[in-house]
Image: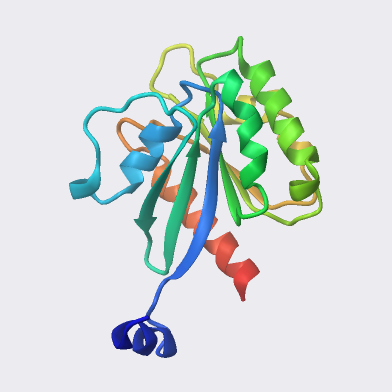
């Protein structure tokens, strides 16, 4: 650790680093959301499906986020649980226009919430009801009902309508998540 790092840490200027898991079914927009949250000069132009996982970083006014962007393809979802212990927050992305797979998203969410490494922790969960720009999209309220989010009583959670391509709804969600993480850390 350099002198500047030590000094900024002592003065409280150094951003707290947090590990966040970004989960959801394939093609829900996870990678696009994370890409949009990075500084514009660090954003990728071509988004490709995530195989396994990738690690991305971005900063807010007070936190340095390290995001584990996990593949949502069926054959990779069993890898999610290997990262639960390290996660300090979860971003769960739902394709709000994919009504057929909403049931699968709910099943994956239920598995997540009942996993021993998550079940008894008060870990904040941010839901993005993504792809609101598509004609078949259901409202974030409807997504919340379809996923039975009202049954989550032991964890802080929030749902935001989003359009990852335009970046709409993302800042609201990240602001909420930042507030929740800071509330836990203090």
Q: Is residue 102 above or below residue 140?
A: above
Q: Residue 157 location in percent, x, y?
A: 65, 47
Picture mark count: 0
Q: Residue 130 location in percent, x, y?
A: 47, 29
- Coloring scheme of the render? rainbow
Q: Quadrant of the N terminus?
A: bottom left
Residue at 75% in and 32% down: 111
Q: Quadrant of the C terminus?
A: bottom right
Q: Is residue 143 above or below residue 13?
A: above
Q: Residue 115 location in percent, x, y?
A: 78, 41
Q: Is residue 154 above or below residue 15?
A: above
Relative depth, front residue between 71 and 45: 71
Furthest residue toward front: 1
Decide if residue 142 is on the left or right side of residue 135: right
Decide if residue 107 is on the left or right side of residue 126: right
Relative depth, front residue between 147 and 72: 72
Q: Residue 79 location in percent, x, y?
A: 62, 34
Residue at 36% in and 85% down: 8
Decide if residue 125 is on the left or right side of residue 73: right
Q: Is residue 116 above or below residue 6?
A: above
Residue at 62% in and 37% down: 80
Residue at 73% in and 57% down: 122
Res 33 quadrant in image? top left
Relative depth, front residue between 134 and 25: 25
């Amino acid at each position: 650790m350099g002198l500047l790092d030590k000094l900024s840490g002592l003065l409280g200027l150094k951003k707290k680093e947090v590990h966040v898991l970004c989960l959801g079914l394939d093609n829900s927009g996870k990678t696009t959301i994370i890409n949009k949250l990075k500084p514009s000069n660090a954003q990728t132009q071509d988004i490709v499906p995530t195989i396994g996982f990738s690690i991305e970083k971005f900063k807010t006014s007070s936190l340095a986020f390290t995001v584990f962007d996990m593949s949502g393809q069926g054959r990779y979802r069993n890898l999610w649980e290997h990262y639960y212990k390290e996660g300090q927050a979860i971003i769960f992305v739902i394709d709000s226009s994919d009504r057929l797979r909403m049931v699968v998203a709910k099943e994956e969410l239920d598995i997540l919430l009942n996993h021993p490494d998550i079940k008894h922790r008060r870990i904040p969960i941010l839901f993005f009801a993504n792809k609101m720009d598509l004609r078949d999209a259901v409202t974030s309220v409807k997504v919340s009902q379809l996923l039975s989010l009202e049954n989550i009583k032991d964890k802080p959670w929030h749902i935001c309508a989003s359009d990852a391509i335009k970046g709409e709804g993302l800042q609201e969600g990240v602001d909420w998540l930042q507030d929740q993480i800071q509330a836990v850390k203090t």
